[in-house]
Image (cartoon, rainbow, N blue to C red):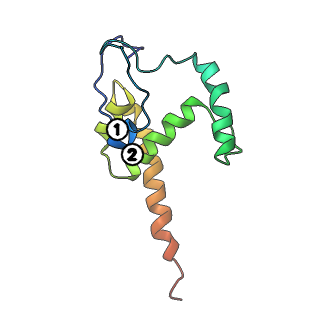
Amino acid sequence: MQKTKEPIYLPLSPEALKWMPERGDKTADDHVFDLPSPSMMNILIKPWAKAAGIDKRFTFHTARHTFATMMLTLGADLYTTSKLLGHADVKMTQVYAKIINQKKDDAVNLVNGLFD
């Protein structure tokens, strides 16, 4: 982890592995991706968002937020999602749980007035 300088374990699903580049002669200590700065990353992902039909502001942070929300929505627990994001404290991840709780509230309220 760049912030803490501590290694973290991040498993990859078979779906994610399908999209990984070939390793070639790289070692286990080599980076998988040579990523640009966060500001450059935001520039590079704009065409991806546009191609996906996303007209809103889209950043690397948005992608992390989407990942966290998706994991919790699909049933991953808060602690595991926290570790996948590299958060040192689960409290940082709790904001995403509040989003999921609101989605649950919205979902059950869809039936309000249905049988009037």
Q: Which mark is residue 81?
A: 1
Q: Is residue 32 left or right of residue 106?
A: left
Q: Which residue is mark 2?
A: 71
- Residue extending farthest to the bottom is 116
Q: Quadrant of residue 1?
A: top left
Q: Residues within 10 Å of mark 1 (few under 14, many from 20)?
A: many
Tag 2: amino acid: Met
Residue in the picture at 56% in, 30% down: 60
> Which residue occupies the foreground of this view, 113 or 62?
62
Q: Is residue 16 above or below residue 110?
A: above
Q: Quadrant of residue 37?
A: top right
Q: Quadrant of the C terminus?
A: bottom right
Residue in the picture at 68% in, 37% down: 57
> Which residue occupies the foreground of this view, 31 or 56?
31
Q: Quadrant of residue 11?
A: top left
Dot 2 lies on which element?
Answer: helix
- Residue extending farthest to the right is 55
Answer whether labels 1 and 2 touch (C-beta < 8 Å): yes
> Which residue occupies the foreground of this view, 11 or 26?
26
Residue 108 location, x and y as percent? 45, 69
Dot 1 lies on which element?
Answer: helix
Cα separation between marks 1 and 2: 7 Å
Q: Residues within 10 Å of mark 2 (few under 14, many from 20)?
A: some
> Which residue occupies the foreground of this view, 9 or 44?
44
Residue in the picture at 54% in, 81% down: 113
